[in-house]
Amino acid sequence: MFNKQIDARFIRDYLCEKGVSFEFIAYEHAHAPTLERMAQTLFIPPQQFARTILLRNDQKYALAVLSVNDHIDFAAIRLASGIEYEIAWPEECQSLFPAMQVQYISPMSALYEIDCFIDSRLMNHSDIFITDGSNKGILKLSRNDFMRFQHAPTVLDVAIDPQAENIDTSAATPDRAQQMRDTILQLQSLPPMPAVAAELLKLSRDPEVRSSHIASVIEQDPAIVAQILRYASSSMYGFRGKIESVERAIFSVLGLNMVTNLALGIAAGKAFRIPTEAALSGKTLWRQPVYCAAICEALARQTTSRLGIKPGSAYLSGLLHNIGFMVLAHCLPEQFIALSRQVEANPEASIIDIECDLNGITHAEIGAELMHHWALPEQILTVMKYHHDETYSGAYSDEAALVLIANRLLLRMDIGDEVTTELPAQLLERLGISETSALVVLENIMENRDEHEALVAKLAA
């Protein structure tokens, strides 16, 4: 087996020993980037920047080498090799490459004595950029020198480029989308709304509901009670007294609307189960909604009063906006595992692009379609469907805009599935929120990670 002490210095020294002419490009930023961001910072053409994915099956390992913007095509590899590969576990990567940072494994398979599959489009370029095994340097090699250091290479179309202009998906995508919609319509496995959530939803529509009614329903679930008391007692709200009951949390800190929606969201979320074999874990899926909900609540307090956005309702919109992922995982586990696999293999790619490639529709549409069965408020269903669309201007567009802004803020902390951190000026102006105040909200939310992570763990359990 190969020398497991291969690291960035070893690779550069090895190339010098072999008389290979290469250019070393230093990356001097303190923050460890994704490969895509590294390419953007260094002005490296992404189609010439190779990344490495370690694959496994029961008998052997292999490397897939493709550009940073492309999605891996497992079917193409299976057809070429006759082997059903999957993404290697992180522990396996760390064991095989202990001297390298796993996400920056250099694609020089001859050094590792591992077979490799190389995307043919990389071979269209005279120069190829590769990592040196760290997040501190990029090597520029000629195509011929790059191929000199490949072990048993198979060059084929190993990647799918969703942005490629020469790929015609006009016929295929609607077919996939229609097939998924047909599957959704035939589903019989959507879990019933939990009893506590159903009762809270009913009470939330009663204009004369009393706090004692809400508290008595919530108290049926000690786990929800514990989370409400934890939230109300946290430094986020600055209450110095002792919170010992749901009613005290309502009157002294959170208010009826917030407590109702917090409890409703937690109760609803507990209905879904995530396949344990999926790379996208329950914690991964719930982390963004939990933080998004907290940001939405805080931002709602800053919105123009004429909009009439209730902080509690904004919280519920944020907490449930991505529930399409949970619905997919619970009701269509095979499709969810396939999505999870592609997301893990293509960390640089937009999850929305991957969903469209696989299913023709996204979690936003899946969630909005299926959650009609629960008779959720129209506001929640609308936010589910349009939370990625900054141009949406229909009913509840302000609530959808809040979720979009919250998620773009979270991307600055490497949380979530948004594709940009840019906060649309027209949406901020419409809501009456400044970018500066939005950033302050983000900072405050991140200072209270313990409270949010506790809820993440509860929902993922």
Image (cartoon, rainbow, N blue to C red):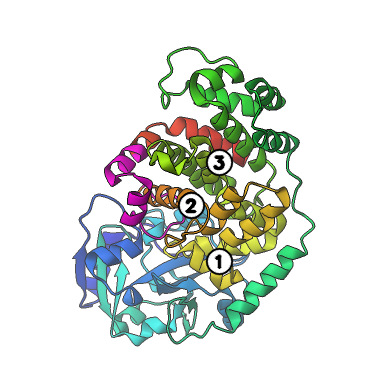
Question: In terms of sequence position, does the residue under pointer 3 or pointer 1 come before the other?
Answer: 3
Question: Few, some or many C-alpha atoms within 10 Å of disc 3 (few <14, some 14-19, many ≥20)?
Answer: many
The range drawn in magenta is 413-442
Query: Who's the residue at 62% across and 37% down the image?
Result: 266
Quadrant in which residue 235 is drawn: top left
Q: Is residue 418 magenta?
A: yes
Instruction: Tell me residue 192's x, y (percent).
Output: 76, 46
Q: Secondary structure at mark 3?
A: helix
Q: Is residue 61 visible?
A: no
Residues at circles 3 and 1 in contact by the CB criterion of under 8 Å: no
Q: Which residue is mark 1?
A: 355
**Residue 304 numbered mark, or none:** none
Quarter-wise, where is residue 128 in the image?
Answer: bottom left
Q: Residues within 10 Å of mark 2 (few under 14, many from 20)?
A: many
**Residue ID for mark 3:** 316
- The answer to which of 214 and 225 lies nearer the viewer is 214
What type is the residue that disc 1 sits on? Answer: Glu
Residue type marked 3: Leu
Left or right: where does residue 433 sit relative to residue 169?
Answer: left
